[in-house]
Image: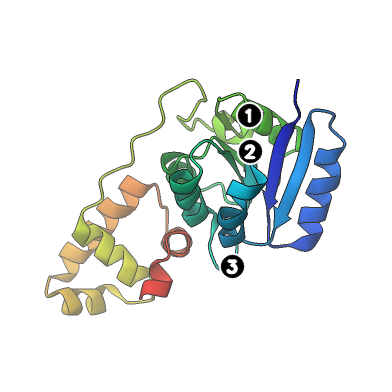
Amino acid sequence: MNAIRVLLAEDHETVRDGLKLLLQSQSDIEIVGEVPNGRAAVERANALKPHVIVLDLSMPEMNGLAATRALKETTPQVAIVALTRHDDEAYVRELLGAGASGYVLKQSSFSELLRAIRAAASGGRYLDSSLAARGREYHTRRRLPTKPVVTDRESHVLRLMAVGHSNKEIADQLAISVKTVEVHKANGMRKLGLRGRIDVVRYAVLNGWLSDA
């Protein structure tokens, strides 16, 4: 059986080196390259021809979500495993919805990453067991979750919230009542599985909202 060709995309060199050493110790895995950001992963994927790309979510130039979307456009045959410290429901939904085959937490054991890589290489999907244990409905053999439909107004309100505007400032800017702002905010957060402003800001960073502000 041919080895699983893996490309590592991680901006912290120490973490990248550690992953490389651990993965190279597996007889069925070959590291074909390593890059410090999502843009480089997209640029090199076609030339390196990996079976699986293991990528971090929080990277400079192009984050993991944007890279996943771009890779699915340019090299759809490559499986993607997200490796991150973020266990937010919204992050899981976004990555799986973008086409990732696996989602593994950095705080989990190395065996989780190995299972995810092997599952992805064989055409399957894998969700970190700690997420599944908490009742998240993303079991690998179930249909991927449908991305919730957030209205344009709900999205707009959350964007303004993420950059620091108060409810009154949002109401004044959108010419609506403070109560209506609160309703849009609550509905948008519920649909996206966001529990507070910190979650909203993380989601905004993941989707590039802050750079667009």
Question: From what the image shows, is residue 153 above or below residue 189?
Answer: below
Helix, strand or loop at mark 2: strand
Badge 3 or badge 1: first in the primary sequence: 3
**Residue found at x 56% / y 61%:** 39
Name the residue type under label 2: Val
Which residue carries the number 3 mark?
60
Q: Are marks 2 and 3 in contact (CB under 8 Å)?
A: no
Badge 1 or badge 2: first in the primary sequence: 2
Q: Residue 46 location in percent, x, y?
A: 58, 47
10 Å crowding of disc 1: few (<14), some (14-19), many (20+)? many
Q: Name the side, left or right, on which 55 lies relative to 139.
A: right
Badge 2 or badge 3: first in the primary sequence: 2
Question: Whole-Å distance between the Cαs marked 1 and 2?
Answer: 6 Å
10 Å crowding of disc 3: few (<14), some (14-19), many (20+)? few
Q: Name the side, left or right, on which 128 lies relative to 135.
A: right
How many discs mark residues in the rendered view?
3
Q: Residue 12 location in percent, x, y?
A: 73, 62
Which residue carries the number 1 mark?
121
Camera-side residue: 102 or 4? 4
Q: Name the side, left or right, on which 108 lies relative to 163.
A: right
Q: Quadrant of residue 36?
A: bottom right
**Residue found at x 63% / y 38%:** 52
Q: Is residue 91 visible?
A: no
Q: Are marks 1 and 2 in contact (CB under 8 Å)?
A: yes
Question: Whole-Å distance between the Cαs marked 3 and 1?
Answer: 26 Å
Helix, strand or loop at mark 1: helix
Tell us which disc is closer to us: 2 or 3.
2
Q: Quadrant of residue 166?
A: bottom left
Which residue carries the number 2 mark?
52
